[in-house]
Amino acid sequence: MLELDEIQKRLLAEVADLHKVPEGAYNIRSNGGSVGRASTENIEIIPREDGQGLTVRIKAGTKNESVHIPVVMTKSGIKETVYNDFYIGEDADVTIVAGCGIDNCGTQDSQHDGIHRFFVEKGAKVKYVEKHYGSGNGAGKRILNPGTEVYQKEDSRVEMEMVQIKGVDDTNRTTKAELAAGAALVVRERLMTHNDQNAVSTYVVEMNGEGASADVVSRSVARDNSYQKFDAKLVGNAACSGHTECDSIIMDKGRILAVPGLEANDVDAALVHEAAIGKIAGDQIIKLMTLGLSEAEAEEQIINGFLK
């Protein structure tokens, strides 16, 4: 493994499932700078001159390769904004794994804002995984504000897995996408907040070409005094199909706001929004308790299954 301490290694395992140097292209960022980078024959990682981001170029036709670009922060008081641009060539089929883990044991806030732009060429396929995680017993906050822009050309497909399950005090996620004819975007967001945490997710997807499609689904749990807002807008500018869904469990004194937005600018734009917010059903808990679980264990079992 690279020259990382045990906390940094633990964070990498949480956000990128990395236990050793990954195969393929990678850039690992820790406490404001790169601690390891590698390109491949088909994937080139180029650092920005200011050190605050990367340009990643993936050759046309690249298949079954991956890019890992995780970030870990273990020093209190670090605040940074990083800009990463991805250029995915025609007919490529790749996986991109990002994510950020912050361990803050100090009194100052630590913050990472990752701005990612994806330029996806005709027929290309991308699976993008972004996980956020926070730990540490300090009074300083763990703040993550990811911004994502996706520009898809004809017949491309992007699948995005957005996960934030533990330890992030404040997050403001913004995602916008523009889809050409036949392009497909699939988003799966999983989120849990607790204590006094706040999480806002905003999606704006414009389907500009015939046959474009978008499916944006969020599953979340709000516990203790936490607050969540899910704001998803689908814009149909052509004959297209779009679906957005918010499915949430509310507990304790948590608060959840779901804001649907559908804008049809073409007679053949078919857009659907679904939203459901509620507490855990009592009969589910009772059923699990009859199997020997305590009430708390039953709740955790239900939540874990819901967020899978």
Image (spheres, rainbow, N blue to C red):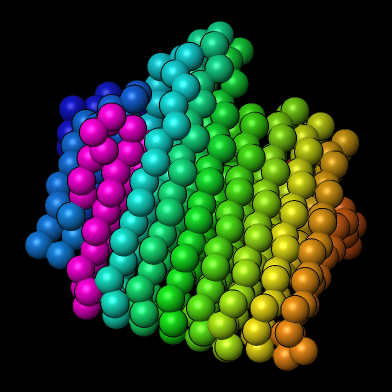
Query: Seen in the image, is 176 located left or right of residue 288?
Result: left
Quick check: 156 above or below 96?
below
Q: Nearer the viewer, residue 247 or 84?
A: 84
Magenta part of the protein: which range? Answer: 45-71
Q: Is residue 12 visible?
A: no
Image quadrant holding the N terminus, namely top left
Q: Is residue 193 magenta?
A: no
Residue lying farthest to the top in this orientation: 107
Quick check: 211 above or below 300?
below
Image quadrant holding the C terminus, namely bottom right
- What residue sits 49% from the left and 35% below the top? 113
Query: Residue 65 sits in which quadrant?
Result: bottom left
Q: Nearer the viewer, residue 63 or 208?
A: 208
* Residue 145, position as x, y percentages in the image: 56, 37
* Residue 263, position as x, y percentages in the image: 77, 71
Quick check: 300 above or below 194?
below
Q: Nearer the viewer, residue 163 or 289?
A: 163
Query: Seen in the image, is 39 located left or right of residue 210?
Result: left
